[in-house]
């Protein structure tokens, strides 16, 4: 194992965790309520799990994508069906070549 590579990946995990905490707080502020510890721990657990799966395939840790946070803050609209539909479209777009 290369210690330099391990340290680099740990730093990427920490940056990703900081971004996830910020995104979670920003979504809740857009909905005019305070973030709870349960929401932060849940978002960090999900981010860590997905990053771990990503690492198994040789990829770097993933990050939460802040453009979704901006759209929630602008529209004040959160709907699981809409988010799931967008997710399915993005997965299909990633699997099908242009």
Image (cartoon, rainbow, N blue to C red):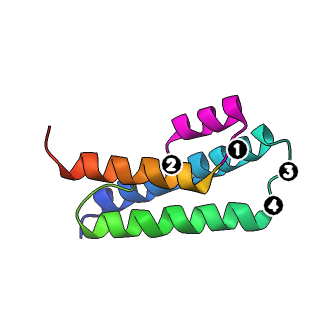
Label 1 – label 2 distance at C-alpha:
12 Å
Horizontally, is 54 left or right of 67 in the view?
A: left
Residue beneath label 3, please?
A: 34
Q: Nearer the viewer, mark 1 or mark 2?
A: 1
The disc label shown at residue 64, or none? 2
Q: Nearer the viewer, residue 20 or 74?
A: 74
Q: Residue furthest top?
A: 74
Q: Earlier in the sequence, mark 3 or mark 2?
A: 3
Q: Residue furthest right?
A: 33
SS at circle 2? loop
- Magenta region, residue range: 63-78
Residue 72 visible in this rendered orientation of the protein: yes
Q: Earlier in the sequence, mark 4 or mark 2?
A: 4
Residue 41 image-quadrant placement: bottom right
Which residue is found at the position 55% from the left and 39% from the top? 68
Residue beneath label 4, please?
A: 36
Residue 58 counted in the magenta span:
no
Which residue is found at the position 24% from the left and 70% from the top? 1
The disc label shown at residue 27, or none? 1
Chief SS of the magenta region = helix
């Amino acid at each position: 194992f290369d210690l330099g590579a391990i340290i680099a990946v740990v730093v990427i995990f920490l940056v990703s965790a900081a971004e996830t905490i910020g995104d979670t707080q920003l979504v809740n502020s857009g909905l005019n309520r305070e973030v709870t510890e349960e929401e932060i721990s849940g978002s960090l657990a999900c981010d860590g799990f997905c990053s771990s799966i990503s690492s198994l395939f040789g990829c770097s840790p993933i990050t939460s994508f802040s453009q979704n946070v901006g759209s929630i803050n602008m529209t004040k609209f959160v709907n699981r069906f809409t988010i799931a539909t967008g997710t399915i479209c993005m997965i299909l777009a990633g699997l099908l070549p242009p």
